[in-house]
Amino acid sequence: MPHRLSRPGRRIDPARALHFTFDGAPHRGFAGDTLASALLGAGRILMGRSFKYHRPRGPVTAGQDEPNALVGLGQGGRFEPNQRATATPLFEGLTAISQNRWPSLEHDVGSVNARLSRFLPAGFYYKTFLWPASFWKKVYEPVIRASAGLGRPPEGPDADRYEHLHTHCDLAIVGGGIAGLAAALEAGRAGRRVLLMEQDTIWGGRTVTDGAIDGTTIDGLDPAAWVARAVDDLSAMDSVTLRSGLMGAGVYDHGYLTAHERVADDRPGADAPRHRLWKIRAGHIVTATGGLERPLAFAGNDLPGVMLASAVRDYVCDYAVTPGRRVVIVTTNDDAYRTALALLDAGVEVPAVIDARSQVTGALPTRVRDRGVEIVTGSGLRAEGTGRVERVLVCDVTGDGTPTRRIACDAVAMSGGWSPVPHLWSHCGGKLTWNDERGFFAPDPDRPPVGADGTGMVSAIGTAAGHMDAAACLGQADTPVTQPVERLPRPTWIMPERAGPALRSKMFLDYQNDVKVSDIQLAAQEGFVSVEHAKRYTTLGMATDQGKLSNINGLAVLSDAVGRPIPDVGTTTFRPPYVPISMGSIAGEARGEIFQPLRRTPLHDWHEANGATWEPVGHWRRPYCYTRDGEDIRAAVSREIRNVRENVGLLDASTLGKIVVKGPDAGRFMDLLYTNMMSTLAVGRCRYGLMCSENGFLMDDGVVARLSEDTFLCHTTTGGADRIHAHMEEWLQTEWWDLKVHTANVTEQWAQIAVVGPRARDVLDRLGGMDLSRDAMPFMTWSDGTLADLPVRVFRISFSGELSYEVAVPANLGRALWDRLLEAGADMGVMPYGTEALHVLRAEKGFIMIGDETDGTVIPQDLGLHWAISKKKDDFIGKRGQQRSHMTDPDRWKLVGLETLDGGVLPDGAYAALDDRNANGQRKTEGRVTSTYYSPTLKRGIAMGLILNGPDRMGETVTFPGTDGKVHTARIVDPVFYDKQGARQDV
Amino acid sequence: MLILDCPYCGVRCDETELTPGGEAHLTRHGPGSDDADFERYLFQRRNPRGVHLERWRHAYGCGKWFHAARHTVTMQVFGTYPAQTTEPPADIVERIRASDPDWTFGDDT
Ligand SMILES: [Zn+2]
């Protein structure tokens, strides 16, 4: 049974007890414990169940590579699933729950899946789709639903805050083991700006624990003392930044590195960001990320109590807990003998070491043998037990698994050898090379990821580079190191090597996703011979641990199954982040109100205080309408429309784009930008213009005013201002750079208020200062002047068909003008109107709206706007595009008005359907609705639409099936529904 | 996450300050061009596995368009230069050829 040992642990402080709960039951651990070590100390090894079969699982590691001991941590807005108990520091009040089980961890109904395992082979998700639908519904779906989902999602918004930190350095070193520390010392002494990060909370990596077991010395010091001295020396260097608890997550192009810091996980509710995402731009990156021990693929290797050998000694030495009282060790290498020594030193029984090698003569095995432990050579084993390890059956490692010995035990420490951690090296294209002798992939120093200058931007050092001894990791020839010399391992990919199907189907490769040796072999047999295909087919390495433990073993099994050497099979792609990082840290502060800045017009506050219902338009908010007491939205919109038609309305038009085009060649440039002739526009006049893309499609429209001989003011749509300004600059800078023209986006410099309705002129006259009469200021002219002593520019333009003036003032005077207009027009019924009234007013007049009548595939000719396309100009953007055969095809969907026969409102976006059907059995279409409203002016539904050859079919009816099953019939009519002569705007 | 030097304002731009604009040095075919030329101009783009001349805009900086010569696999940058030119400058061509002696401007392969 697992239990706490009465000996010191390097990381824990037995004087400081901490209380926590697991599945509601109270437990106690010590400061310095992880959740896993505290649970082991409390006698508990079952910590979770697997994803597919719900098999009982205990921790297999003591770190970030853990596939099994995944728990849900926290509560409410701080709940987070799939957290590794082995890497979760214990704190007072921690609450954890187990996952993938129902009703309880001990009694799980879903583990019936395990008995169905022969029906859930590799690729079973894909295969189920080949079965009849009835099978899917009755058999597979319930099984999949029972097993699907890893943990449960948090409920409600995240209660914590997160932040980003940007920094630069000459050298970023990832990994604070002896290799990283030595590299930081060297660079720091050379005066370079160094950032040294370590994912663990303490420095020194494996060497401190392992060196204390085997008596390693560095520079005459024990490793702990050498590490302490190195950290002291580095702390004294101004150019060096040391951060523990900072995990190097991902390497990206040109020396960009992300790192994840768990700032306040152990202080829920503290006044601090929970996590911090570091965004680092480094001159060079050094990966000193160490190695990961590989499990061994023997039958029963997923039973609780089977752990990596290094994890067992970490629990014993660092946390003073042991997974069992009798621990069998199974290994392919000398390193696992350190675990035997650690267990013996802690008084734990080691009945035998099972070693796959036939010759075992190294210094570490000799020490173990000298302490009376039997070493069984040339052997492997399988583990058995109910719910946890109870015995191992020893066998010849090259045989079929026939047992030669039976050894009772309650834990197994396994070591399949070590692999460098190549993730960060590989993220940005660093290549690996296969070391056949030791059985691992290591970074190939001749093929690093390269930076902007074409030279390597990442170097791997230490164990991450494939060095498996302290002297090579230090890389300092003049530093004396004493350490027992290790003999070569015997890479062993399945144990025993000639195991039959029964054993192979109990050898787990990917614990979290329940992928077994037999699954990989089946995938290969079915033709999934590429490592990337086999991965997706079997889900090997696709769980939250991203195959840290399973990767090499899995591809070795695949290599054997397809009869190709391991380096030919290759690895799957290593992708960031190295360890999962919180979504919150990726979002950082960009959430809620500051997710996206809100653009406010100078009148925003007035709208808010006066009943505005907001509509998002681009990054702006515009009032959709202003509701009054007892009014619903529909009533408010109707009131606003009627008031514009009968009295006078005010519209905040400040969001309209305003771009100044200025220079000696401004006229030439305007002629290229717009489809109309703009160079002939007289100073003081306005003209409605269209802008197309080079493809010929209509992209924006608006009124252009000529301010002076060399200056034009272009109005754009609200959403189009930035895009159109960028479009202008792109053509000016990259195609017509000989033109002497400047552009400036002055949208936010001006507040603009549309005064619209039969009494518009009366209201403005009351402000005083300008002659706005029909003679002094005809339709489609503009004029500078003053109104109510405010400097204004007045445009006599109309988007509603009514008498209309748009008055622009410097933005800071917008509110003053608005207030004057409301005062002056109070007895004339002046009231503001919103965007919905604006839309209905323009639709009653048949005016198009970019984004309603256009969708990026519509040319101006489709909209009956031929009059705005110059035939005199040699060139404009889109002219050539509009000459293509499909654009000049007479049979196109074209703009018309649509009137329902019953006076109702057509559904927006509805398609006009024919009785004919296409090859897929769908009804053919002949058009669609682009704008549709209830018109309070006409007291009926009105709509515009694009209909095949519509203008030639006036009076015909077309049919629009709605999504609600109703069929709407409409007559094709002129799109101008109101005041066809345009008399009202020209008074 | 590229770093490109803006040849106008001199800022070393993080990729987040830039917007990409695709292949550089396109020849515009306007009214009067035949369909094949217009199609090539409007739609056909090189997508080399190797050195690419491409357009970038320092959108969240000085606003200027510039060109970059970049290797699409290694991400090596041979240089950046103003967009107001119809061919890459000689010093950048020289740097490209130091890495890929067979490279020639406008070669489709
Ligand atoms: Zn710039």
Image (spheres, coloured by chain):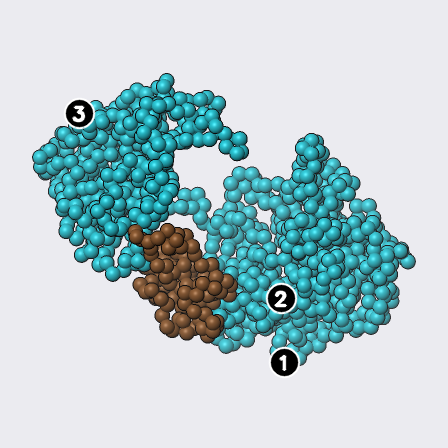
Q: How many marks?
A: 3
Q: Which mark is residue A675?
A: none
On the picture, is A398 further left or further right than A227?
A: right
Residue beneath disc 1: A477
Disc 2 residue crowd, few under 14, some 14–19, many 20+, Cα 10 Å: many
Per the rendering, the colour in which chain B appears is brown
Q: Which mark is residue A827?
A: 3
Report helix, strand or loop for mark 2: strand
- Looking at the image, the residue that sits furthest to the bottom is A478
Depicted A416 relative to depicted A713: above or below:
below
Q: Nearer the viewer, residue A828 or A315?
A: A828
Q: CA distance from mark 2 to mark 1?
A: 26 Å
Q: State the image coordinates of residue A966 (x, y, percent, origin top left).
A: 46, 21
Amino acid identity at mark 1: Ala
**Residue at horizontal 34 percent and vertical 49 percent from the top:** A694
Q: Is mark 3 within 8 Å of ligand 1?
A: no
